Structures are given as structure tokens and as C-alpha cells.
Amino acid sequence: MLCTVASRIHYVAFAAALIVVPVLSGQQSKEIGIAPVPAQIVAARKVFISNGGADLAAQVAFKRAEEPDQAYNHFYSAMQTWGRYELVSAPGEADLVFEIRFTAPIYYNGNLATYDPQFGLRILDAKTHFLLWSLAEPVGMAWRKAAWLKNFDHGLGALMDDLKKLSTPSPASGESSKK
């Protein structure tokens, strides 16, 4: 009897928390505005692309595919195609440094190891060396080469979309971007 009463009290407390917490968080979200994107990202014209490399698991896969710098090469090509920023050959000439990296961390689900390949992009102020922003996009795992290339391209496309949204000036800033 005592256990039943105690479990009912826990059930009622849990149900009340489910009702109260969303109401409180809804009130807070109305008070919080959207934080600004660092002005350097929007105002920059010249970018140096740094090869942040790949972790060991990704390096093995890229070397097996005979393209050890696949992430860097494809990101560089996508940036050239986009044309938003002038790509420079030295960080001293740049407004921003884009450090592209590819990782494939391993997660264990019981006895099964699962890879989680992903792009990572760090955006640094070239003058101060401060990290301004960081982006990441997953790349679906695949065992066949054709599927891997499709997933890789999809992940890179998503990363580029994130970067395009981030670097586009908001209407409130009054700036126009070169596109």
C-alpha cells in the first residue's frame, strides 16, 4: 500500500513537471533574441582555407580510396565554385581562416562499433586567431564506393549550405553580399 502511494506521488510529480517545464521554457524563449553572427564573417572578402586533416579512421578510408586529402580538395573546389570569398594562398592575406577537418569517431553500441563520419569547419579571425564560429555536418556511412561518394557530396553540400546561411548578411545589417 505504501509503495503504491509513493509511486502515485512520483507519477503526479513527473506529470506536473512535464506540464510546467514547457510553459516556463516558452516564456523564456520570448525574452531571448537571436544572437548576432560575428561581423567579420559577413564583412570578410578574402579567405585562406586550412587543411585541418582527418582523424585516423578517416585517413585510412581516404588512403584506401587513393585520395588522402579528399575533404580538403572537395571543400576547396566547392568554395571556388561558390565565389563568395576570394581564396588566398597565405593566411596573412586573409580576413578569415576556414579550417576544414574530417573525422569519423567510433561509437560502441553494446558489442557493435559504429562510425559517425562528419565534416567540421572552424572559422577563425585571421588577425586575432580567435575562433568565431564552428560548423559540423554528418556524412552517412556507406560500404560501397558509389554510396560513399553520394553521402560525402551530400554532407559537403549541407556544410556549404550552412556556411552560405551564416555568411549572408541579415536584412537589419544593411549590407549586401557578393554572390
Image (cartoon, rainbow, N blue to C red):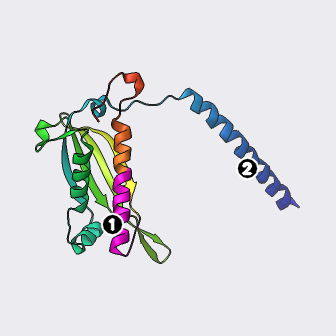
Front one among 60 and 65: 65
Residue 124 is marked as none
> Number of numbered discs present?
2
Residue 14 is marked as 2
Mark 2 burial class by Cα count in 10 Å: few <14, some 14-19, many 20+: few
Residue at 37% over, 57% down: 155
Q: Main secondary structure of the magenta part?
A: helix
Labels 2, 1: front one: 1
Question: Horizontally, is 62 left or right of 9 in the view?
Answer: left
In the image, residue 58 lies at what x, y percent?
29, 67
Indicate whether 129 appears above or below 100: above
Q: State the SS at label 2.
A: helix
**Screen quadrant of the N terminus:** bottom right
Q: Quadrant of residue 167?
A: top left
Whether residue 148 is visible: yes
How far, Cα to Cα, is label 2 from label 1? 47 Å
Q: Quadrant of residue 82?
A: top left
Indicate whether 116 appears above or below 11: below
Q: Which residue is mark 1?
A: 149
**Screen quadrant of the C terminus:** top left
Does the magenta segment cover residue 85? no
Residue farthest bottom in this picture: 111
In the image, residue 37 lies at what x, y percent?
37, 32
The stretch in magenta equals 141-158
Residue at 21% over, 47% down: 80
Does the magenta segment cover residue 156? yes
